[in-house]
Image (tube, grey):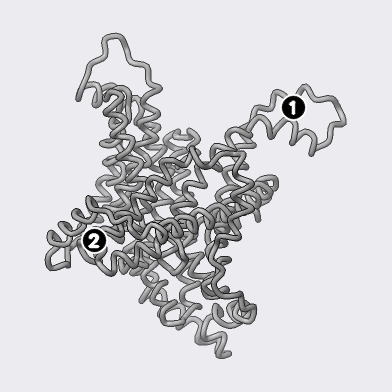
Amino acid sequence: MRTSLGFFALAVVCLFFSDISISTQEPWVELERMLIGAVTPDFSPFSAIAHALIQTIAFALIGVALSAGVGFLLAQIFHVAAVRIVSAFVRSIHELFWALIFLQMLGLTPLTGILAIAVPYSGIFAKVYAETLEEADTDALKSLPAGVGIITTFLYVRLPDVWVHIVNYTSYRFECGLRSSAVLGFIGMPTLGFHLDSAFNEGNYSDASALLICFYILIITLRLWMRRRLIGFYLLLSPFVIDTGASVNFANVARFFTQDIVPAPLRDGTISGLFEWLSLLINDQVLPGLLATVLLTQIALVATAILALAFFPLISEKFLGRFGRLLGHVFLVVIRSTPEFILAYIFLQLWGPSMLPAIVALSLHNGAIIGHLVGRYSNEIRLRPDHSSGVNLYGYEIVPRLYGQFLAFVFYRWEVIMRETAILGLLGIATLGFYVDNAIADIRLDRAMFLIFVTALLNIAIDSLSRRIRKNLRLNQKVEQT
């Protein structure tokens, strides 16, 4: 409880230094237009919607399949320090940042979108698969006869024991891949985000509503159309349905590594100017971006925790009946299935470019995810025969008994919220992503790469701090689907 109150107090302090103003002239008029569009979706351009959804699925499927294979191989050597460091680094950079990097090298090609998903997801898969294998039951190994090979032992003893967990996590990560694929449309990929961006810019909220509804249906029905026996067919078909776009220019790739990302003073042959270059970049961009990123992250983290505690009864058997839980489940699926980038984009149209849209978007998205997990966990709690009901049941019996697990979920999401906070700068919010976007727009890729490197280090530091806090609080329960 002291830790919770400490984080709450820190978030209150951060509020005093944050910009949560509303800069739009008539936000309620825009909200009314959005609500009208939400209840009057326009499905008439169905072919364009279907095309966007197919592109979204194809990019996600190829990216996740590629990263799952690479991650599985890396998991076998995850005990090597270099592998752990590289995996931590690549997964600490958001998919949109990777997309911006590959966009400079490969152009607006399908490979850019696929690698933007595959690279960070490989690091995630490597870590999760390695931890899953480490936690496998080792009793069967004791019964093996002497001389059995390593490969045979792995394929017939270790892998079967964890295969279900690996499949379940990979399925969950594919759902995440669909959200990532959709967001890639905001940088030009022909996925859902591209059409959403156009619809919002033109004020066609009915078109945007239709796109989002179709995306929700896609997520909700995932278990119906993503059958194991069909995965191979989908994988074979995906490369043929992706829009080809431009071809890769390898001269651009070479120039990216040999010139574009080399600090300007080194390109000019003036090593003495490197310190001035770093000093100017740190003072003018890194420090302001770091401050805004940390402020927004800490506020969103606490707001996420508060919303999660409010959301979990919506799907808990301890509080609602079957019909009530169904409505709660639909609500949480809609909120957590909407990428935080899209939520922030919507709120920016309503309130303008301050921290407020980002705080609300991050809190809703992550609060719905944690609320769903905590709600499922609450169903496993066995109540005493003389248990109370209503508010007393919530405050005096359920919450105290699941609070440790709830904190574990929140701290597992801390690093994720930090990554998402940084990337929201692409929408005009003054986090680190804002300065990255400006550097790329000015074709100063050396500055952009340095800022992305700082972002990665910040995410690694937050992840390390989160693990330490969980260890000190003995919150070591494994969380696979956060």
Residue furthest right in the image: 147
Given the image, on which type of amino acid does mark 1 rest? Leu
Residue closer to the observer: 328 or 234? 234
Q: Which residue is mark 1?
A: 141
Number of labels in the image equals 2
Q: Viewed as shown, does residue 32 lie left or right of 124?
A: left
**Label 2's element?**
loop
Q: Which residue is farthest top?
A: 385
Alpha-carbon span between mark 2 and mark 1: 56 Å
Type of amino acid under label 2: Ser
Marking on residue 18: 2
Q: Residue at x 76, y 24 (%)?
A: 142
Q: Position of residue 315 (x, y in %)?
A: 32, 30
Q: Is residue 345 visible?
A: yes
Left or right relative to 53: residue 131: right
Front-most of 172 and 82?
A: 172
Considering only order in the chain, which callout, 1 or 2, is on the residue closer to the N terminus?
2
Residue at figure coordinates x 41%, y 41% from the top left: 220
Which of the 4 image quarters holds residue 368?
top left
- Residue 367's image quarter? top left
Badge 2, how many Cα within 10 Å: few under 14, some, many 20+? some
| Quadrant of image for the N terminus | top left
* 6 lies above or below 263: above
Would you say residue 84 is visible in this rendering? no
Looking at the image, is 26 positioned above or below residue 470? below
Above or below — where is 118 with respect to 376? below
Q: Which part of the image, by quadrant, shows the C terminus?
A: top left
Residues 308 and 104: in front is 104
Mark whose residue sits in front, 2 or 1: 1
x, y percent for residue 201: 29, 69
Any mark on residue 224, and which?
Answer: none
Residue 75 at x, y percent in the picture: 65, 46
